[in-house]
Amino acid sequence: MDRPNDPPAPLALSGVSAGYERNDKDRVLDAVDLELAPGTITGLLGRNGSGKTTLMRVALGLMRARTGTARLFGENSWDSPAEVRKRLGYVAQQFASFGWMKVDPCLAMIGSHYDDWDHGLVDDLKRDWQLENRRIAKLSPGDQQKVAILLAVGHKPDLLLLDEPAASLDPAARRDFLKAIVELNADRGQTVLLSSHITSDIERIASHIAILHGGRIVCHEALDEIKDRVGLVTLTEPPWPPVENVLASQGSRHWIWNPDECGLATNVRVEEVVLEDLFVGITAR
Amino acid sequence: MRSAVVLRAVLGRWWQLVCFLPFVIYVVVLGGPAVANGIAVWLMGIAGWIAGVFAKDLGNWPNRPLVPGYSKTLFQMVLVCLLLIPLACGSLWTALGNPPPPFGPGLLWGTIMTLCVVRTAVSPAVLATNLAGIIGLGFYLIWAAKQAMHPVVFESLTDWRLQFPALALAALALFHIWRRLNAPLRATTRNFEAEGREPLYTKLYGLIAGLRARVWREVVVTLPLVALALLLVLLVRTGITTYHVWIVFVLACLVYSLARVVVRLATIHVPLRLLWLSGAAETRRSLGRECALAILMLGFGWLPAGLVGAAILALGMHQAAQFDGVLLVAFTTLLMIALFVGTGRRIPSTKGSLQLLAVGVFCGGLTITLIHGIELGWADRSAMVLVLAGLAVATWWAVARALARAEIVQ
């Protein structure tokens, strides 16, 4: 429960439903609830087509929710004022714009929209990523994605939404990018929602994970909490753990909250949770 | 660096020059003494047009502050285009025993238009293209239809009593251009940081103008104009009356403009989203409104060019044809205003509204003045109105779809 003086959550989705078809039954998102606490890095996981991009677009106010509300810093995202939007950064899956411009002028042009554009940060990242000042259309997809990331982080946004930003980056660039995100988070308490299929990246930097499946957020927890309290148990016969303790199941494998407290047989082996396995388990339902 | 800029400006526009190729071929292959004056005027117009294109390209040059001597380079190009090329061509023509071309009026027209181009090349830079188009198409139309024009028009243009004052005025205009380019507040130090404080519509012009489609697509949308040019050459040679040619041309300008609008609409959504997220506009409606206006102003850049050129041409036509032409111009102007108001709900920029008002007043005045005869039947006229209305609806729909696709206005 928020106290009256608490700052509003950077992003809060409540009962959000959205879709692309006119048929209201064909929903990509179905009553999604998600609230990001300030300063957290949340990894958004979901299978292909699960609605991660749609969720981000609704969150940003680029798409209207059919039902429910999406709020950015307490303001309705669809009608958010310019001051709120200036606090956002967004990297789309594919960067397909400004192809006629060179990298530096493009950065300068977008930077001109912001009062606090961080030239030092952008220059550092550009140098680390060995990004040449060429026409954007002539850059490789990976380099184009780097430009998109620079455009999104240059104004040091308070809320950064990254839609599979590192998919086309090489390992070195990906590492630099993740480092930059962590540093921004540490320096400014930036809130980040990062969608990715690379679970190792999320494990490396995320404080929380949210798993989107069947149009809903089926798991939104602190990553440390999951690592500390969830165990992978292989059970072929009773005693079964209480239903409320089961986070996910796949065949005989069960991811269970506090397995030590579930009254399972003492000789049952509890394994450490691997995020990728957990994701597969949850989304296999 | 400077030569690189110039080279880019020239090479980057080769496809636009294609529009004029049929006329060059026509003049070279079929021309004779009768087209001497037309050639000179046409050359003046083309020169001014090229200068305008240079100015526009330089105005849009991303790292312009890095270009040394921007103003000087621009002025040199203006001088070369306005003076040296047509003077050389005209002198050669006169030396071959032909009557002197109308240097004075041509140069005056070119300098005035270039002055407009220079004024607008800085903010918003892209309007220069529109004005440059006015020069090129206006003179092209004069040339294309000169055989049907009243001889007194060309005689007066070449009269020394008009030539000398016009030359003097052109020199004054050139001096003014030079002063403007070298004024201390000129844009040599302008950069994107400064643009950040400019109004939204200025940014939009730059962004949308930069949405250049691939060359082949631009060539495709240019093809109708080239095809029309060939058609006009054929029509003039087969003796079909000027006003038919003229009407076809104005309609082609409409179609061509619509094609350019559609090309831009296809690529507008991503920059629009970025603009929205960067807080460039307070409300979705204001962003959509200004975007629609910018698209139309840029996409229909050739339309006012055709209209002004057509209006000039109308002065030389026989009276009975003038009414139809002016009627078409008036309807087209109304169409433009309806489009701007319909898609934008209002005309947000002072410059845009003044430009529209000027065109509207001009065309309205001509309509009142020149209504003397009727050559087209009411059925033809109704069809024309239907075509224009259809274009208006199609454009409105296309703009609305593009804005919806960008999820800016739903």
Image: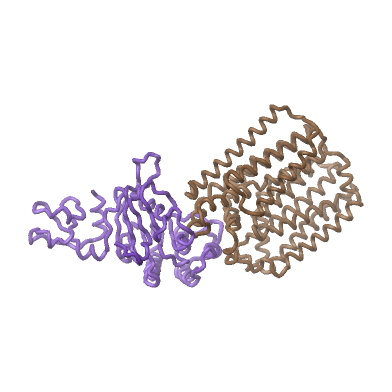
Q: Residue at x 86, y 58 (%)?
A: B168
**Image quarter in which the N terminus of chain B is found:** bottom right
Residue B401's place in the image compared with A37, above or below, is above
Task: Pick whichever, A164 or B325, lies toward us.
Answer: B325
Identify the residue at horizontal 86%, vertical 56% (top origin): B167
Q: In the drawing, does residue A207 fall left or right of residue B188?
A: left
Chain coloured brown here? B
Q: x, y percentage for residue B240?
A: 77, 32
Q: Position of residue A57 (x, y in %)?
A: 41, 53
Tally of numbered tags: 0
Residue nearer the viewer, A264 or B15: A264
Q: Is residue B326 left or right of residue A172?
A: right
The image shows residue A119 at horizontal and vertical percentages of 50, 70
Would residue B139 appear left or right of B383 to someone viewing this image? right
Q: Colour of chain A?
A: purple
* Residue B351 place in picture, x, y as percent: 67, 54
Task: Residue lying at the far front in this picture: please name it.
Answer: A4
Left-right relation of B62 to A278: right
